[in-house]
Amino acid sequence: MADKLEQKALITIFGGTGDLANRKLYPSLYHLFRKGYLKEHFAVIGTARREWSDDFFRQKVTESIQDIEGSEKDAEAFASHFYYQSHDVTNRESYVKLKNLSEKLDEKYQLEGNRLFYLAMAPNFFGTIASRIQSEGFVDTEGFHRLIIEKPFGHDLESAKELNDSLRLAFNENEIYRIDHYLGKELVQNIPVLRFANPLLNAVWNNKYIANIQVSLTETLGVEERGRYYDESGAIRDMIQNHTLQIVSLLAMNPPIDLTTEDIRNEKVRALRSLRVYEGKEVAENFVRGQYGAGEVDGETLESYRDDKNVDSASTTDTFVAAKLMVDNDRWAGVPFYIRSGKRLNKKATQIAIEFKKNPHHLFGDESLAGNTLVINVQPDEGIYLYLNAKKPGGGMESMPIQLDYSHTSPDGSPIPEAYEKLILDSLRGDATYFSHWDEVSTSWNLVDHVIEEWNKETPEFPNYASGSTGPKAADELLARDGFKWFDK
Ligand code: BG6
């Protein structure tokens, strides 16, 4: 009987010698192997410019999984499915060789023509590769053909459109899996379940009960080795256009008709399209940008962004963004969605806080009575917390804030799968729910492009926050103006 778990496919990774492949893709594939999703019928071709042998490649793959407990037992069996092909993405001959190898492996492992192409490399060649995949007949087999593509998906709406058009020459929209690794995180995937599986929350998820929603994606690291890419991108393209707005869309969307990929995506797109697009001076009123200066963290002095060796010494690139977004529909009229993301801040955390409105009349006579807040801790310490008020032990009716905690772990105690592991499995199974649809990508770019256009008209006074701090003061003022402050627990 056919094994239901097992996914049959040839996985071709462009950028097979790169950092992403080593740090994320090979360990994720190994976990899928260990769990039986990949078994006999799979093969992986790693391609890149370098001349490597299969043996050397397998050694690298084995090294990439050596820290996984117990991997010494089956690392060799796993790595035996890996093949290396040196590849020049612009050279036709290279594709001919790659295709021959693909056909050979298809037959050897009986892969039924299923092909997954993973572009884990610089985006400037995405279009070239996709069109070659088509013109050289890689997608003429019987099975499925899917393309996984990493961010950045364009630099602005126009370049994203160009990129998309080039991919669409070879693949349909439903064959393109645009990775947003935040959508693979357990607690992000939890948002729709929490909202729609709980009548209690579903009933209050609107402007009658919610005062504001906050989404914070903060990091302690600077730009590390990625200064060259980052200086062209900034936090707004690196973290806001994709990860942050994806989370906002899950929080703001209306209930889908069904839990199908299409129904969920339709509602996410509607939510994104309801986001107010700021123009002119509204941008400065609702968006704060920042760039980190030097600072001292744990006794160590950290250099400023502009002092990074790969960054322009007068760079005006944003390493921090905070914004007040408004969702212009009946459900959310009047409820601000505050977002922020930045590098070199005081902590690494992704946290969503839903602050509920306070009682309209103060039965407890106390203005300082804590509000009810639902917190979704995406990382670290994955969990869900609800802040309520309860009676102080002892006599009287005095209240005190309490916290209900739920810590998210696998039912059997095994580690929660990493985002990449889940997303690769989804793509093998043909489930695109937690990938970004083109309509989502383009709508997000439109919003972000308007902000950048306005920013480009003025030179910001950077740096405006110290490494290790909570970010620029203006980000706190953004909320203070509305009588709120950033949730920080
Ligand atoms: C990436 C950004 O998409 O996400 C990086 O390009 C950022 O700049 C990273 O550091 C953060 O991801 P995570 O999973 O560590 O929160």
Image: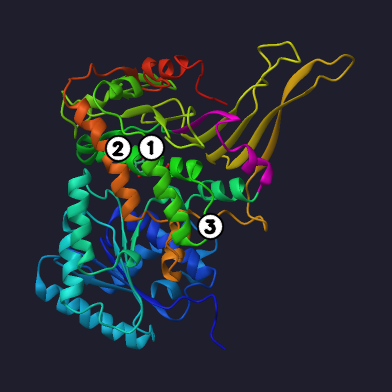
The answer to whether 459 is drawn above or below residue 375 in the figure is above
Side (left or right) of 192 relative to 147: right
Find residue 422 and name its label: none
The residue identified by callout 3 is 257
Element assignment for label 2 = helix
Residue 470 appears left or right of 139: right
Identify which residue, 298 or 6, lies in the foreground. 6
Residue 412, how many percent across, how many down? Answer: 67, 58
Q: CA distance from mark 1 to mark 2?
A: 8 Å
Give the magenta range: 198-216
Residue corresponding to mark 2: 447
Residues at marks 1 and 2 touching, judged by CB atoms closer than 8 Å: yes
x and y percentages locating residue 370 in the rendered image: 66, 20
Q: What's under tag 1, amino acid-wise?
A: Leu
Whether residue 212 is in magenta: the answer is yes
What residue is shown at x 71% (from left), y 11% (from top)?
Answer: 366
Q: Quadrant of ligand 1?
A: top left
Any part of residue 291 in sight = no
The quarter holding residue 225 reads top left
Q: Earlier in the sequence, mark 3 or mark 2?
A: 3
Give the residue pinned by disc 1.
275
Label 3 Cα crowd, 10 Å radius (few <14 / some 14-19 / many 20+) = few
Disc nearer the start of the sequence (1/2):
1
First of labels 3, 1 by sequence position: 3
Residue at x 23%, y 32% (from the top left corner): 452
Helix, strand, or loop for circle 3? loop
Q: Nearer the viewer, residue 265 or 170?
A: 265
Residue type pointed to by label 2 = Leu
Q: Residue at x 28, y 63 (%)?
A: 16
Residue 199's place in the image compared with 91, above or below, is above
Q: Is residue 352 above or below residue 258?
A: above
SS assignment at label 1: loop
